[in-house]
Image (tube, rainbow, N blue to C red):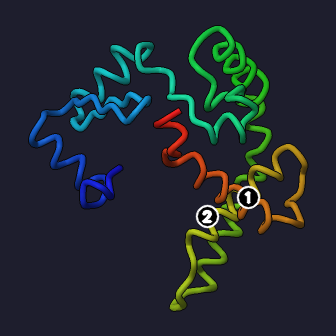
Amino acid sequence: MFHLLGGLQHHVLRDLAKKYGPIMHLQLGEVSLVVVTSPDMAKQVLKTHDLTFASRSKLIATEILFSNGSDIVFSPYGDYWRQIRKICLLELLSTKNVKSFNSIRQDEVLHMIEFFRSSSGETVNATKKFYQFASSMTCRSPFGKVLKEQDELILLVKKASKFVEGFDVADIFP
């Protein structure tokens, strides 16, 4: 949509906010969007009225890639979401669990620091290194090792991200 309005997303939204104010409603076919462009309005939306704005729009890509939106990120706010959030907090993100992976985090951070230190003066692909860091952390924590197919996993994550970061025509016009 933003390319049709002639510019980068943040520039287009800035210009729209100057004209229409810090909170806007955009209707893109069947998809309803609320755009907030000021810190005060963001606080209102994210803190005061968080339950009103808690759910995301259902997108074709999330239904396909994430089992009909049944994961914690894309499931709609409600009883099911509260239950899986509770499980994540108790089983995955408890203080004890997070502390148990401290040595893995330290090890991966040291690897990354050493990589950048040894690459001093050279051009490096920092994005690739951060993807590798995230992949290593994600795999080492539950499995105890980095996947041999780490590059394939990173490519898959990038492809999945492309699918969910924008709208598909089918999302806008069912």
Circle 2: is it few (<14), some (14-19), or many (20+) Cα within 10 Å? few
In primary-sequence order, the first of circles 2 and 1 is: 2
Quarter of the image holding residue 131? bottom right
- Residue visible at 49% across and 45% down in the picture: 167
In three-dimensional space, the C-alpha distance between marks 2 and 1, rounded to whole angstroms, equals 15 Å
Decide which of 138, 42 is in the foreground and name it: 42
Residue 132 at x, y = what percent?
Answer: 70, 65
Residue 3 at x, y = what percent? 33, 58
Tell me the mark number nearer the camera, choosing from 2 and 1: 1
Q: For the residue marked with disc 2, what is the amino acid? A: Phe
Q: Is residue 100 left or right of residue 126?
A: right
Mark 2: secondary structure: helix
Q: Check disc 1 and report its element: helix, strand or loop.
A: helix
Q: Amino acid at mark 1?
A: Leu
Looking at the image, which residue sits at the far left? 19
What x and y, as percent, mark residue 115? 66, 77
Whether residue 93 sits left or right of residue 47 in the image: it is right
Tell me the residue that label 2 is attached to: 130
Residue sitting at the far top: 79
Residue 6, percent from left and from top = 24, 60
Evaluate if marks 2 and 1 touch, with contact meaning CB atoms under 8 Å apart.
no
Alpha-carbon neighbours of circle 1 within 10 Å: few (<14), some, or many (≥20)? Answer: few
**Residue that numbered label 1 is attached to:** 156
User: Which one is nearer the viewer's eye here, 60 or 159?
Assistant: 60
Furthest residue to the front? Answer: 174
The quarter of the picture where residue 82 lies is top right
Residue 32, placed above or below residue 14? above
Q: Which mark is residue 2?
A: none
Number of callouts in the render?
2
Towards the viewer: 32 or 127: 32
